[in-house]
Amino acid sequence: MPEAVAMPQKRVLGDATNNPRGILNSPGTVKKRKLDAQPSATVNSLPQNGQRKPFGSSQPQKSQFEEEVLEKLTQDINGLKDSNSEKDQQWERPPLGDFDETKENICFQQIDAEEGTITGGKTAVRLFGVTEVGQSVLLHVTGFQHYLYIAAPVNFTKEDCDPYRAFLESKLGQFQPVIQSVQITMRENIYGFQGNQKSYYLKITVTEPKFISKVRSALENNPQGLNYKGLWSNADAGILTFDNIQYLLRFMIDTDIAGMSWVEAKAGKYRLLGPREKLSNCQIEAVIDYRDLISHPPNGEWAKMAPLRILSFDIECAGRKGIFPEPNHDPVIQIANVVTRYGESKPFIRNVFVLDTCSLIVNTQILEFDKEEKMLMAWRDFLEKVDPDVIIGYNIANFDFPYLLDRAKHLKCTGFPYWTRLKGMQSQATSTSFSSKQMGNRDTKATNTNGRIQLDLLQLVQRDYHLRSYTLNSVSYEFLKEQKEDVHHTMITELYNGTPDSRRRLAVYCLKDAYLPQRLMDKLMCLVNYTEMARVTGVPFNFLLSRGQQVKFLSQLFRKALEQQLVIPNMKSTDEQDYEGATVIEPSRGYYGVPIATLDFASLYPSIIQAHNLCYTTLLNKNSVEKLKLKKDEDYIVTPNGDMFCTAKVRKGLLSQILEELLAARKRAKKELAVETDPFKKAVLNGRQLALKVSANSVYGLTGATVGKLPCLAIASSTTSYGRQMIEKTKQEVEARYTIANGYSHDAKVIYGDTDSVMVKFGVTELEEAMKLGQEAADYVSSKFLKPIKLEFEKVYFPYLLINKKRYAGLYWTNPKKFDKMDTKGIETVRRDNCLLVQNVIETVLHKILIDRDIDGAQDYVKETISDLLQNKIDMSKLVITKALSKADYTAKQAHVELAERMRKRDAGSAPTLGDRVAYVIVKGAGGSKNYEKSEDPIYVLENNIPIDTKYYLDNQLANPLGRIFEPILGEKKANQLLTGEHTRSISVAAPTSGGLMKFAKKTQTCMACKKPLSGKEEMAGAVCAHCRPRIGELYTKTLTKVSDLEVRFGRLWTQCQRCQGSLHCEVICSSRDCPIFYMRMKAKKDVEDAQKELSRFDFDPGAW
């Protein structure tokens, strides 16, 4: 067994014989905080006698962080002091008390579902959940068997069912029974209009869910061997099977259970399991037959949420110098935990598990341990006692979970990895890959916590939001408008090996990293929104995080198909096929100083599917049209791209019915939302209406997914063809009606159209008039289309800058009295591969053009900025570019990749790794250098006085965005003049010509007054030449003032960083490169050092004074 890594200069708790530093025994150094003691024995921020001293030489200063942030953690103390002081320290769930299964129902919100077995190997579905009073439940649901369908041959009869079951059993060759039964039944194929006639199908039920894939594969791939009596005459290509869906979803669909919904087991219908029978740590564990289980639809009373326990945690590790922490070498030194209940805005548990001693933190339990193994096992016991329903954090999936598991394995803590609710079930981290058009390829890890929900806020934010940076600091500032001290992993060990006060500083940092994910979850409504998506689509909560869009749509489709006795074919995926997408009307580029009305189709693609009855169940071909003797336009329609679908009079499509129900449910949710006053109920209703909207809009996309479960390009391409036709028709109708000839003041013109909206210039100058005409036009055009297609007027852009297709900006008005916002699309204000200078310049230019209506002022601002850039007056923090190191091998050389490699050679421990975002600037290089050769780490640039390639930023960062904005306004020639002229004169900075990029020729000292090169004794004298010596006093005063001014600037930045980190008494160690102040502070520090060097030159010649 490898020994635990030694941690030199560590303070170890215990008696003097085990204390390498000979720390004297005292209550403050000997007392250990153990988890098996009562929580009241742990260290609290305010001891009962009010006089207890912290571990250390002095009481730590009370920080602003404690006042502003930790106060938020403990606001419930004052409000609940009298009635809830004991509850605040209570870790365990409410006690179960006497429970009589003959009298008491088990009603709970199920949060996790999985396939499993009970004693004896019997298959069961495990439903984990929480009751209304907060007690944990595991309900084993038995008796449900998996099945599939195949079309019955013509001559197959009821009497053939048992012989066919025996035939299949013999052919499958298993050592145990596989086929439970074969039944003949009436069903209808969902794919293609069948004349509203059902056909005979065989329902094949298996004894165990694991056999379903074996039976399906045998039928589809070995048709001749399973062709009973040769009844399947056309079975050479395989026997088509129907309803290919996994067991858990089949169970939830057939029992009408939706994810995160409430279920109920009535007294007398279930059997409560005794202590010896229980498979879990849940307070209530029972068994019930699926036919006795009651499912409550998640509406009205049953839309409520249980008081779920939510644990947010963060760990800190002490890495070696220059090396990112590795679990086989580097210890876990702190684990911070914040626990809240859903429905309560304040946490009821706040603690930090600390290796070694730690000074006190206000209203936070500090649990100290002398050995890492004890701390890890105590945290596992804490997890079991708290029994969280939801575990959250930031990057816990890829770092915290795997690190804890690997570290415990290294330390041989065999009892540690039991984080699930099942006894004896270990948590294991497995590597997975995720790929999507939205997020690209990502390697990630997944750790099972059976019975508990996991929410990694990093993954959720990456999935749902497009940001410049995804660090916790950056994301917190984006959504919470606050930043935190960012301690680089290389500094953690130094703080840990310091004093109790320095470990306290680290604990406060760790605690905030545990608290921020909870605040982000509340702010972004992640839990409630995903809950409502699970309820609307019917899938388990964890499917939303681990699966794509298709499973949500298929769940809804299978539920509706079950109602109407439809079966869904198991279609093979085909090669990706393209079809023509939406129309984009050629834009009339320019700057419009008059109101531009925007008309939008409400839910365009869902409304097209409904209006034209596009569905799998209504799809026709020529043979079916002739066979059923259908009449065109009366019984069926031909879409613009030539596909045929029957009308709603003949058969209403299943997709239309699903969409109707989704949109009607959304309308009800929005109506309830408008009158609801309870904030938690409002959150649930808002999450529901958003989930319904997303679900409705996703129906179209999945019909076009040729690699999906049920592709139908006829539906997808017909939908887009109708969309193109409607955009063109809207343009024609508006321009034909709103003319001078028809009595209007101007001829209307559609200046742009994109997918589901058109921009109309009515020619009027008043906002009220434009809004009136927009509403009138929307109503008029809507009357030309089938219901429920509706064109809506929502906004006016005034003024409006139309740059190109999918690129525009304008002031967004819904009320003529005040604009709502400045709206942009496709413009470089959020692109992460542009530096902040581009974003700032573009935003300022648009503000001057659109809000100030000052085009000349915008031009002057651009010229001034370009002049400052070329004269090196722009702060370097605005020139930093960030790009993700997303793969190990790139075909072409790229700036951030080459820099990462150079940084690895300098210091492998601090260099970026795969998945990190690399920050860099472009510096001047030798003639002919490629841009990827000129990328450099901003800190390295500051430390080594490397000149920035300002011409690169002008030509490659600013030129194109500025050109796109100003060309439609000024014309190409005048727009180009912004990039040339007197304001583009730059200060020449010598670039290296030999010896590598970072080697500069040695500079000669010059006179500080006349800049004459100094030589001989003059150079040794330091400050000035002999000619300028009479001015030395004036020059000294000027230099001293410069040093003073720079020190003031640096001091202000330093103090600002101290306030952010939470203390005006500690050194600033924050290394957040997402914060522009970080680079400003580093630059100010370097400026002070350089100015002090200049000042020191006057010390060489005291005789000159």
Image: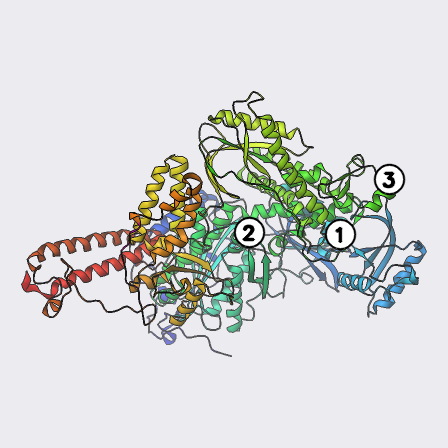
Disc 2 marks a residue whose amino acid type is Arg
Query: Are dots 2 and 3 in contact, CB under 8 Å?
Result: no
Tell me which label, 2 or 3, sits earlier in the chain.
Answer: 2
| Left/right of residue 868 with respect to residue 226 in the rendered view | left
Tag in front: 2 or 3: 3
* Residue stretch in magenta: 984-992
Disc 3 marks a residue whose amino acid type is Lys
Q: Residue tagged by mark 1? A: 290
Name the disc covering residue 309, or none: 2
Q: Which structural element holds mark 1?
A: helix
Q: Residues within 10 Å of mark 1 (few under 14, many from 20)?
A: some
Disc 1 marks a residue whose amino acid type is Tyr
Q: Residues within 10 Å of mark 2 (few under 14, many from 20)?
A: many
Q: Residue tagged by mark 3? A: 629
* Residue at x 42% of width, y 44% of height: 972
Q: Which structural element holds mark 3?
A: loop
Q: Is residue 495 above or below residue 781?
A: below
- Image location of residue 566, percent across then percent down: 80, 47
Q: Which residue is the extreme one toward the bottom?
A: 1
Residue nearest the viewer, comparing 144 with 984: 984
| Left/right of residue 557 with respect to residue 869 in the rendered view | right
Query: Are dots 3 and 1 in contact, CB under 8 Å?
Result: no
Give the Cα separation between the discs numbered 2 and 3: 62 Å
| Left/right of residue 591 with respect to residue 1078 in the rendered view | right
Q: Residues within 10 Å of mark 3 (few under 14, many from 20)?
A: few
Q: Which structural element holds mark 2?
A: strand
